[in-house]
Image: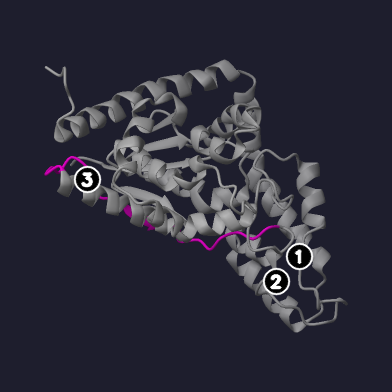
Amino acid sequence: MKKKIALTGDRPTGKLHLGHYVGSLSSRVQIQEDHSQFVMIADAQALTDYAHEPKRVSENVLEVALDYLSVGIDPKKTTIFIQSLVPALPEITLYFLNLVTWNRLKHNPTVKLEIQQKGYGEEVPAGFMIYPVSQAADITAFKAEVVPVGDDQLPMIEQTVELVRKFNRLYQTDVLIEPKAVLSSVARLPGIDGKAKMGKSLGNAIFLSDSPDEIAKKVKGMYTDPGHLRVEDPGKVEGNPVFTYLDAFAFDRAKVEELKAHYQRGGLGDGVVKKYLLEVLLSFLEPIRKRREELAKDPSHVMNILFEGTKVASAVAGETLREMKRSMGIDYFAH
């Protein structure tokens, strides 16, 4: 049976953290076993709002690749590639832009929210406004049937489906495939400050590459239940990041449930729970960090993996583009 095609990716604006692991990296390691998986380092998309900091983007391409390889994304099973080096993608984006209205782009909920978060006002870069279309090009270029996303990205997949249907209907073809969003089964990991989202630039993340000392410092300073002032006070488990992290990473479920019950009835200090969380995280991250350190000794080998993956990705996306142009009747010199 032909394997289903999956596409995912990350913007290289910083190293990856535990939130990325829980939300996407762990599922990619599983998906590669029974899917034909493409993982994109979305540097061109990162430049839609980091055009003034291209070095930040280019330097993090290697960092993101190191994170991918260290968690077990296998280049023998997964094609890892650099978005800006696949020339078919911007051309497909251009053809899709003719099939979507500016009004539709303005009302994409994900774009609206991010414009608000970034405080653009009226100064929104055009590249940022059209990135749902660019994302649709990325997905359709590889004929991805499966796109693992967070629920905040669902409007992007909806817009991709709209564009696929419009293209196929307009040009009387079935060249493009409608993708399906696959939502992560794990709830989003909060920041160590208790904020809803862990972010690269928010100063509230534990990175996959953090040293044991950095992890210890971050765990020690983690937000807990602000009402749990004394050891004997009953504490809240819901909304308490320490317990959320234990739920995500601790193997000993019985111990976690026991700690929760003790914390809720009182008599258990935050320090004790944090000490256990630190043990859990150090045990989980140590093999990842060691693999990463080993891989980082030979950056040219890692970049060669990206070079080879990008060659494969370019060939696949290029073939889709040729099929699209044939459908549109603009394959002028094709034989």
Magenta residues (range): 171-191
- Helix, strand or loop at label 2? It is helix
Instruction: Sort mark 2 into few (<14), some (14-19) or many (20+) by Cα contacts within 10 Å.
Output: some
In three-dimensional space, the C-alpha distance between marks 2 and 3, rounded to whole angstroms, equals: 55 Å
User: Residue at 30% across / 37% down in the picture?
Assistant: 95
- Looking at the image, residue 79 sits to the left or right of residue 284; the answer is left
User: Residue at 77% across / 55% down in the picture?
Assistant: 219
- Helix, strand or loop at label 3? It is helix
Label 1 vs 3, first from the N-terminus: 3
Question: 90 and 283: which one is in front?
Answer: 90
- Helix, strand or loop at label 1? It is helix
Quadrant of res 154: bottom left
Can see residue 82? no
Q: Residue furthest right?
A: 230
In three-dimensional space, the C-alpha distance between marks 1 and 2, rounded to whole angstroms, equals: 7 Å
**Where is 144 relative to 66, above or below?**
below
- Looking at the image, residue 260 sits to the left or right of residue 138; the answer is right
In the rendered image, residue 80, in percent from the top left (x then y), is placed at 44, 31
- Tell me the amino acid under the disc marked 1: Val
- Residue bearing the label numbered 2: 259
In the rendered image, residue 42, in percent from the top left (x then y), is placed at 49, 36
Q: Main secondary structure of the magenta part?
A: loop
- Looking at the image, residue 158 sits to the left or right of residue 206; the answer is left
**Where is 144 relative to 266, above or below?**
above
Instruction: Sort mark 3 into few (<14), some (14-19) or many (20+) by Cα contacts within 10 Å.
Output: many
- Residue bearing the label numbered 3: 167
Question: 271 and 45: which one is in front?
Answer: 45
Quarter in which the C terminus is drawn: top left
- Residue bearing the label numbered 1: 273
Per the rendering, the mark at residue 221 is none
User: Residue at 50% across / 61% down in the picture?
Assistant: 186
